[in-house]
Image: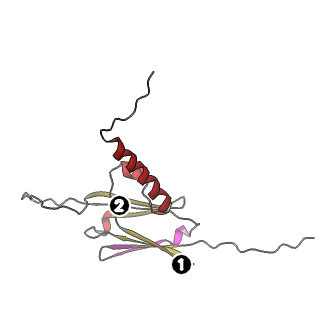
Amino acid sequence: MSKLTRYSEFPVIESIRRDMDRIFDDLIPSAWRMDKDEKALGLWAPRTDMSETDDEYVVTVDLPGISKKEIEVNYQNNRLTISGERKKEEKEEKKDFIRKERYEGRFLRSFTLPTKVKDDDIKASFQDGVLTVHVPKAEVSKQKKVTIT
């Protein structure tokens, strides 16, 4: 029985795309990449900054034009997920767009955090179209010398 393979009219371009994906996978930390599942769902990913101090992670997400009630922040198994939806503009008049760059529909960003966090102390605020999530790090146990008896 022969094996089915995907046909492409542009095998060279497909090969270059796969190579570029591999290069970027190596360059970009996994916490910043969209999962393949997220891409497959056709979701868009808002611009996000993630910073770290000794005490916490801070995630800042640009969400202009989205109301606070349309945003959800969840944390489970060391994974912070920010999701929501930008509703389509519904107007009676038809518009012929010359250019349309703003995303509409559902969005999702998900980050695996590199250390344990205090999940009960995670705080999120939303002001002027910017979501800021403060994720405090859990106390790291310090090295303790054990006396041998």
Q: Please give the residue where the numbered disc 1 appears in the rendered image.
A: 53
Q: How far apart are marks 2 and 1 (CA)?
A: 24 Å
Q: Label 1's element?
A: loop
* Residue 3: percent from left, percent from top: 44, 27
Residue 49: quarter of image:
bottom left
Q: Earlier in the sequence, mark 2 or mark 1?
A: 2
The quadrant of the picture occupied by the C terminus is bottom right
User: Tags 2 and 1 in contact by the CB under 8 Å rule?
Assistant: no
Q: Badge 2: how crowded within 10 Å, few (<14), some, or many (20+)?
A: many
Residue visible at 38% across and 49% down in the picture: 16
Relative side of 96 to 7, left or right: left
Q: Please give the residue where the numbered disc 2 appears in the rendered image.
A: 45
Q: Does the magenta stretch include residue 120?
A: yes
Residue visible at 37% across and 59% down in the picture: 108
**Which range of residues does the magenta coloring cover?**
119-131
Residue visible at 26% across and 60% down in the picture: 103
* Dot 2 amino acid type: Ala
* Residue 36: percent from left, percent from top: 42, 50
